Image (cartoon, helix red, strand yellow):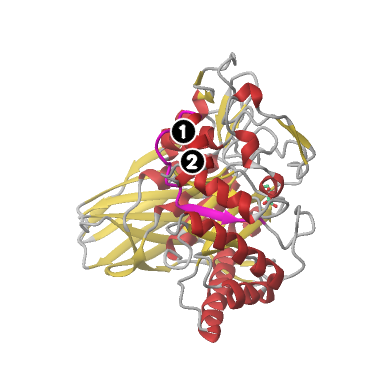
Amino acid sequence: MECKGFVDASAVIGKLDKRCYGQFIEHLGRCIYGGIWVGEESGIPNRKGFRLDVLEAIKELNPKVVRWPGGNFSSGYHWIDGVGPREERPRRYDMAWGAEEPNAFGTDEFLEWCRLVGAEPFIVVNAGNGTPEEAAGWVEYCNSKGGTYYASLRRRYGHADPYGVRLWGVGNELYGRWQIGFCLDGAECARRTMEFANEMRKVDPSIEIVAVGCEDPEWNLEMVKKAGEYFDYLSVHIYIGGDKPYRELAAVPLDIEERLRNVYGLVQSARQRYGVKREIRLAFDEWNVWYPEAKAPLHEQVTGVRDAVFTGGVLNALQRLCREVPIGCFAQTVNVLPLIIAAEDGRMALTPQYLVFKLYGENTGDHVLKTAVDTDHYRSSGLMRPVPYVDLSATATEDGRTIYLHVVNRHEKEPAELEISFRNFTPKEASCMYVAGEKVDDRNTLGEPDRVKIERKDGTVEGGRLHVDLPAHSVNVIKTLG
Ligand code: AHR
């Protein structure tokens, strides 16, 4: 299959906020306990209780933001249970997931772990059965320099300096009856969001707030109309049933891109209509494929190359949506719908989805550029639309000397002979890294952790055009120096 791409180095869509490659970890199944945290006494190698192989693997992803503690879990979580001497922390019934929460991993552990992996913390407060006062106390514990109760408690527990947590979520999926303390409609959620944001900002006016949004226009309209001056980001979650035919799954990122644009468009119309001055963008703070086998209590699944193609497609969409959706959090990082499989016996496997995150995280620019592709299409019966086999997104470094091309070849059988031409950029050399495996169903498992790898090849440059052959069902990042 032949395919032509075009990149305009002088047409910048926007600055790339690298938080779009962010992660989400929740007290659920073996994500925190067994994945992120094993405790200092564990036989599994650890650093201060943090599972070492997972810590190192996440450091390599270099996520710019990590969301915690949930998810549904956050709507029943009382943060005070998770601070102070570990042996004195209460063991609580976790109503959200019907599990036992030992509270060994709490605020200070999360913030220390974020420091170790180099991520900005994003904390979701309990706006389910919690109170605005409790949430404001949490902000005080994390951010206050003063001598008041919670700031002093933090010092007493060994953390002299405030952490300066900037990003706070008020609630999780409060539109759903499954959520502890759910709201009946957007108006009720708006009222609750205002009360929480108000008290939290009285403690630290510099924080940024992520409010609960969804894809229901009525909900979002009420949120913006009533609470629009109280939050900075509206959250959207999308999970895709993984048990679709490959071609349908590979097409879904196009739909996700359109859906996010629609939500953003509605938010901007509502701001205009109701005179909301505060800028509001989207936080796509839970997204992934979800296979039928990923059930309670563990929510485990082993994803493969087909899911890596989906993931590359979503990351390309998020790059193109850099102005509208600066935050993305993949759900979830370890053991639950996982990027990383961390077994109880100490073995670990990195999924092809993980490899895609690694590729993008390590090889990306600072600005997103305008691109066009001339490629064959197939028809998606689910989306009822033509789907281009090749998807292209491009980013350039600040100095304009390097361009990264992020290219997905959705074709399940055919490689793509890609030729890229540029405006206002002359490529001198190009190298390509990609994830493709041999078959779309290839996976990395504990028994065979290296079946799918990041592979490398060179591109050629001739007459100002770049040529690379993209394997079938592949996610590629091509680095080109000008
Ligand atoms: O990621 C698993 C769960 O999915 C989260 O707790 C919830 O927010 C979503 O419904």
Is any atom of residue 201 visible in this view?
yes
Instruction: Give whichever of 235, 465 is nearer the camera.
Output: 235
x, y percent for residue 100 = 75, 32
Q: Is residue 356 magenta?
A: no
Instruction: Give whichever of 161, 74 is nearer the camera.
Output: 161
Read off the magenta span.
157-172
Dot 1: few (<14), some (14–19), or many (≥20) neighbours within 10 Å? some
Looking at the image, residue 346 lies above or below residue 290: above
Disc number for residue 155: 1
At a point 64% along the width and 18% down the height, the residue shown is 345
Looking at the image, residue 478 lies above or below residue 400: above
Looking at the image, residue 348 lies above or below residue 137: above
Instruction: Give whichever of 454, 48 is nearer the camera.
Output: 48
Tell me the residue that label 2 is attached to.
151
Examine the image and state in which quarter residue 451 appears: top right
Is any atom of residue 171 visible in this view?
no
Dot 2: few (<14), some (14–19), or many (≥20) neighbours within 10 Å? many
Examine the image and state in which quarter residue 191 appears: bottom right
Tell me the distance, in whole angstroms, between the alpha carbons under discs 2 and 1: 7 Å
- The quarter of the rendered structure image containing the C terminus is bottom left
x, y percent for residue 312 = 50, 52
x, y percent for residue 202 = 50, 59
Which kind of residue does numbered mark 1 sit on?
Arg
x, y percent for residue 214 = 65, 65
